[in-house]
Amino acid sequence: MIGRASILTYGCQMNEADTTDIGQALKRAGYELTRSWDQSDLVVLNTCAIREKAEDRIRGTLGHLKSLRARRPWLVVGVMGCMAAQSADYLSHEADFVIPPMEAGQLSEVLAGLPPPPGLGEEEGDLPPLEMNQETPFKRFLPIIRGCNHRCTFCVVPNTRGPEYYEPPEELFQKVGEMRDRGVLEVTLLGQTVNAYVHGGWTFATLLQEMAHRFPAVGFRFITSHPRQFSDEIIEVMATRPNVMPYLHLPLQAGSDRVLRRMKRLYTFAEYEALVGRVRSAVPDLALSTDIICGFPGETEEDFDRTLEAMKRIRFESAFMFYYSERPGTAAVNLDGKLPIPARKERLARLIRLQKDIQMEVNQSEVGRRRRCLVERTSKKDPAVMLARTPSNKGVLVPGPESLIGSYLELEIQRADSFILFASQRA
Ligand code: 5AD
């Protein structure tokens, strides 16, 4: 061991998956991984740039690390992830190395060029080691596409992660085989537009079908899908493969066609709604989740009402809701009709209130149902209560011992609120 290293991960599941690779590179370079970043010799921030708030948080952490340097002058700070592309100039003054997503493969080389840390201080002793994904070793993310070919006008991802690159199918099958052999029960296929997958003669539908066929004991989910490329073949695979889980994350972003056009989303609300109708009628018990942006430049009260109306019509099982955040380098920066931040926040509060009520009602319909749930971990509030997930990825709290983690239970849902289900264990 040449020193201790920590990784702080921000943002999306793609970053979580990348953190596994970063961890492996650090170990290969001779570092021991630990959660105690204030006692590390090297800290890697795996960053997010999707909204200004994400960058603000990371700037705060960089400030903390600077003050930590007073005590540990040899501390090395590296920045990876999307902010390393989006704000490289700023970071070049704040970090010892900055590696954007498209150059992530260079990490090992950069590590090899670092000066070794000055041996371990006596006061420190053994630190809790960090094993990647130790909380849920039976769930894994698998990136199948990197980058994004869309040009949504609000989004930094095409700038930070570059154009689409598709992982070869045989490598993906091999990786899932290895995961299965290590006891992984559920795999989530990842891509910014996961359903855009193409490779040789393969499409996303045929890849998913083959995955499900080759690994019948593994449950598959996939995020994130773009409505424009969601083919009937994908619906068919979801409907016919029992181990493709009934969960779909399909960002709507806005309910007004005028706003959708200005966002360059490439569909109308009517097309979106028709697609949802097809998926829901083919996949019973589907849980549909979405992303919504409010306060986009030029969004009128009437446009915003369309979004509220859309949410009432579709009744998403869950929604990630954001107010528009201006991102340097994106096309929306040049659109007119910017709304003041308080107006954006006020719309967001209305969205959240509406969705909370909808979720309360949707979740009530789960009461009395029996679901085969995977127990993930102990609940944060009570160690005698476990957090499990339904096939559609809803959280369920159930009393029980820690020894249940990693096993499937047949649970009867007894109670529900807007954000969680409650179950009892039945023999
Ligand atoms: N402002 C607000 N929300 C954004 N998202 C992406 N870019 C922005 C932005 N500039 C949201 C979208 C996307 C999710 C990951 O983040 O809803 O689907």
Image (spheres, grey):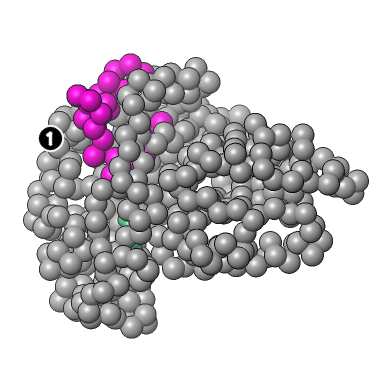
Q: Amino acid at mark 1?
A: Asp
Q: Residue at x 56, y 46 (%)?
A: 379
Asked if one can make out residue 98 in the rendered structure from this viewpoint, the answer is yes
Place of residue 336 in the rendered image (x, y in percent of width and height, measured from the top left): 22, 79
Q: Quadrant of residue 234?
A: top left
The part of the chain drawn in magenta is: 187-215
Q: Residue at x 12, y 58 (%)?
A: 269
Q: Residue furthest right?
A: 122
Left or right of residue 232, residue 361 in this image: right
Residue named by callout 1: 232
Residue at the spot 35% in from the left edge and 20% down from the top edge? 170
Q: Where residue 287 sits: x, y (%)?
A: 28, 44
Under circle 1, the secondary element is helix
User: Which of 231 and 289 lies nearest the eye of the viewer?
Assistant: 231
Residue under the point 46% across and 33% down: 140
Q: Is residue 359 visible?
A: no
Residue 387 shown in magenta: no
Spot occupied by residue 182 in the image (x, y as percentages of width and height): 53, 20
Which quarter is ligand 1 in?
A: bottom left
Q: Nearer the viewer, residue 14 or 164?
A: 164
277 in relation to 204, above or below: below
Q: Quadrant of the N terminus?
A: top right
Q: Is residue 211 left or right of residue 59?
A: left
Label 1 beta carbon less than 8 Å to ligand 1: no
Q: Quadrant of residue 126?
A: top right
Residue 263: give x, y in percent of width and height. 21, 63
**Looking at the picture, does residue 325 appear above or below residue 187?**
below
Label 1 crowd (10 A; few <14 / some 14-19 / many >=20): few
Is residue 213 covered in magenta? yes
Task: Work out whether 259 lies above or below 169.
Answer: below
